[in-house]
Image: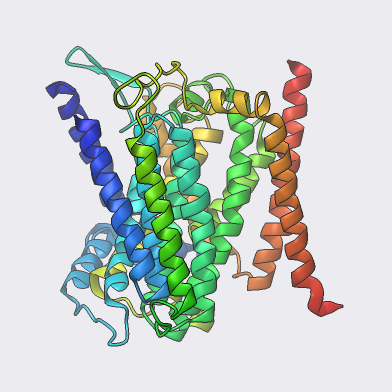
Amino acid sequence: MDLATLIEAVVKVHVVLGFVLLGVPLIVWMERKVLGHMQDRIGPQRVGPYGLLQTIADGIKLFMKEDILPTQADKVVYFLAPGIAVVTALAAMTVIPFGDTVTLFGREIPLRITDVNIAILFLLGATSMGVYGIVLGGWASNSKYPLLGGLRSSAQMISYELAQGISLIGVIMITGSLSLSEIGRQQEKLWFIVPQFFAFVIYVVCSVAETNRAPFDLAEAETELVAGFHTEFSSMKFALYFLAEYANMMVVSGVAITCFLGAWHGPLLPGPLWFLIKLTCFLFFYIWLRATFPRLRYDQLMAFGWKVLLPASLLNLAATAIVLTVMG
Amino acid sequence: MFETLLFGMLAGIAIGCALGVVFHRNPVHCALLLVGVLISVAGIFILLHAQFVAALQVIVYAGAIMVLFLFVVMLLNIKGETPLLTPGAAKFFGFLFALIVFVELIWTAVQPSPEGQGMPDAAPLPADFGSPAALGRVLYTVWLYPFEITSILLLVAVVGAVVLAKRKFF
């Protein structure tokens, strides 16, 4: 490994992680603003132009808050859990390509932190580890509501992970590759949402459940569980959970864009910009969902995952296999 | 050199966590340490150029099976009051079998290899070793029957689980 490669890697890591960490306050602002308008309110507007600095102010407030440690909490795990949530979300971000390659200073630089040949599996691995952040947070608080929230989320995320993974296999079969940048490259002419429309729908539904967002936010469910798994967390620990949730939204949106919506391809504008535009649209869609749908009941959620989504994704897989074999 | 260092680190973490699994009193901590063991073993798989197996190790064992373990442990809410070692005969046989395994391992390790001194050299790896494609090809040709038999075994286990879970309705 020469010095230039090292510098390239360090710069890319900082740019991507900086983008995520700066993007999260913007997404939170967008969410509050969009939700506000959808509910016939204005949303934040006092701090900064259009209330843009509201989330920054909230962040500073969270920094200043007292860090409360419940007396009966399991101290080590209580400290570890928010960290696991954030680390897994950021680790998943490293394999998502946001462009093809650019040539800078005579070097060809691929626009992704790393291009492992099992990127999709790495991603599924990272998200499946992300469950621990929530489950352990719920357990370590040693309190009723967080425990219930944590248990719910563990069952929910394991159930929806299955259908999510299987829905991606169709794309893998078409491209013959597990590398996300290779999948992105093959969509120059045709976005995979066309041949894999059902897989796309299943993936989107599952990814909402994976990120614990409405209408699948049973782990939080404030009407019955106070605030679910993060009830006992305060100050920056709470902020870390918040950060992890929004970083996870970016990850699952990034995967949806890379696997189904033509990755960085698009007319006129450069690749990374197209990626950003698609990402923003996708995140808007998430917020739209939250404003539209009421929360599901827990048994409905589990029944839907196992009895509808999983068989549907398997059917889609079989259909894809048959079509690919017939067409040779 | 670098690989040896990494291997040492991962192996050290794995052994440390494994000892923790055995000796820790809190079942949730034990489960977490077991996750640590599984992840560091996945790291060793990567050092052996078996990325696919490493990914499966993390997704299936650390990500799915251990979460279910935790789920059950949390639901049962076992307090860390059970004694560390069971008394009497169990203790005796435990030590006996551990000793047998230990002697066996040492005996295997000190055996001279057929070629003469030390371990035989590793065979050169094929270019696509450990890739999903290579693994899939071997799995569906050379090892097809063991693979299918394993899947039937899993099916039987699933059917058994359903029968056990449904029993209360009959």
Q: Would you identify the image quadrant in which residue B126 lies?
A: top left
Q: Of all residues shown, which one is farthest toward the left?
A: A3
Q: Of all residues shown, which one is farthest toward the right?
A: B170
Q: Which of B147 and A236 lies nearest the eye of the viewer? A: B147
Q: Give the residue displayed 53% in from the left and 56% down from the top.
A: B64
Residue A219 appears in the rendering = no
Q: Which of A43 and B94 lies nearest the eye of the viewer? A: B94
Q: Give the residue displayed 41% in from the left and 18% down from the top.
A: B123
Q: Would you identify the image quadrant in which residue A72 lies?
A: bottom left
Residue A244 appears in the rendering = yes
A239, above or below A140, in the image: above
Q: Which of B22 and A182 lies nearest the eye of the viewer? A: B22
**In the displayed structure, does residue A159 sit left or right of residue B82?**
right
Residue B50 x/y as whole percent: 44, 32
Q: Give the residue displayed 24% in from the left and 42% down from the top.
A: B8
Residue A70 x/y as whole percent: 29, 84
